[in-house]
Image (spheres, grey):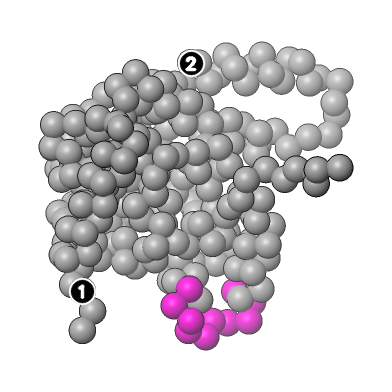
């Protein structure tokens, strides 16, 4: 008989404590976005380190509802948190970057801006964790890792990933067990990279279908092709940078 959700949560909490001890660190921190993945992670690290866990809310041209939801997660988990507004810094950075690219007529401004937003958040979390000697805790789940639905050196730039083996439906089940507010669990997944952006809209398939695929169940041919294409295109995100052989 398999382990219950509660047992798996308890084991993960113990694993988090082991990771901190092995690293010679003092605690754990996570960026809280207002979505279910970061919410579950906040609850887990708070349980692992009641006195040495930190949530970091980083608005960056963000939807006010996401900020509101992030604050709800912080309150529900009772995790200590700080809020750092990156909007002005981000706007200045992008203005300076694009002012130097005016001679380049062709470029993907939308993706450049979205990924820089994720990487600015990563740099902010690492600055805080370096100061505190905390580990940066990632929030990516199995579906996101397989499809590469994360920003390289952005939300993918972390020290440990406690949700890496969980499908999205398992994330929701764990979230219910641990006490994440239901409205957060049911919220449409979004990285908040641009207005009205959703994960599933950007990927072209749904988390339920990706979960079925990861569990070995048959999925529609169209979705199978999308998932495998996403996986192939994002292979570089899941390994160290390539280097030539030693000549």
Q: Is residue 77 left or right of residue 198?
A: left
* Residue 71 % position (x, y): 23, 35
> In what element is the residue under mark 2?
helix
Magenta segment includes 120: no
> Residue 105's quadrant in the figure?
top right
Most foreground residue, 199 or 46:
46
The residue singled out by tag 2 in the image is 88
Quarter placement of the N terminus: bottom left
Q: Residue at x 48, y 84 (%)?
A: 217
Most foreground residue, 207 or 66:
207
The part of the chain drawn in magenta is 214-223
* Residue 201 % position (x, y): 54, 57
Quarter placement of the C terminus: top right
Could you tell me how far apart the alpha carbons at marks 2 and 1 are, in whole angstroms? 47 Å
Res. 214 visible in picture = yes
Most foreground residue, 226 or 131:
131
Give the total number of marks visible in the rendering. 2
> Residue 64's quadrant in the figure?
top left
Q: Is residue 1 above or below residue 44?
A: below
Q: Nearer the viewer, mark 2 or mark 1?
A: 1
Residue 3, which numbered label? 1
Q: Residue at x 63, y 61 (%)?
A: 230
Q: Is residue 116 left or right of residue 103?
A: left
* Residue 155 % position (x, y): 48, 41
- Characterize the magenta stretch by its predominant secondary structure: loop
Residue 121, which numbered label? none
Res. 69 visible in picture = no
Most foreground residue, 175 or 134:
134
Mark 1, other Cα within 10 Å: few <14 / some 14–19 / many ≥20: few
Q: Residue at x 19, y 31 (%)?
A: 52
């Amino acid at each position: 008989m398999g382990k219950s959700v509660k047992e798996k949560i308890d084991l993960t909490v113990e694993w988090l404590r082991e990771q901190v001890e092995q690293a010679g660190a003092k605690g754990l921190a996570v960026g809280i976005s207002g979505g279910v993945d970061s919410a579950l992670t906040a609850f887990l690290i708070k349980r692992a380190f009641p006195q040495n866990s930190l949530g970091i809310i980083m608005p960056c041209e963000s939807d006010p509802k996401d900020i509101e939801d992030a604050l709800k997660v912080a309150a529900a988990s009772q995790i200590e948190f700080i809020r750092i507004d990156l909007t002005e810094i981000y706007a200045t950075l992008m203005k300076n970057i694009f002012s130097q690219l005016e001679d380049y007529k062709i470029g993907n401004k939308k993706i450049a801006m979205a990924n820089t937003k994720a990487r600015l958040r990563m740099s902010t979390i690492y600055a805080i964790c370096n100061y505190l000697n905390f580990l940066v805790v990632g929030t990516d789940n199995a579906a996101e890792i397989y499809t590469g639905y994360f920003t390289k050196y952005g939300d993918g730039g972390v020290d440990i990933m406690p949700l890496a083996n969980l499908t999205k439906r398992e994330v929701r089940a764990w979230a219910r067990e641990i006490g994440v507010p239901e409205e957060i669990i049911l919220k449409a997944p979004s990285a908040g990279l641009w207005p009205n952006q959703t994960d599933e809209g950007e990927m072209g398939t749904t988390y339920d279908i990706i979960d079925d695929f990861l569990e070995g169940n048959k999925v529609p041919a169209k979705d199978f092709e999308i998932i495998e294409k996403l996986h192939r295109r994002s292979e570089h995100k899941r390994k160290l940078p390539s280097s030539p052989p030693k000549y």
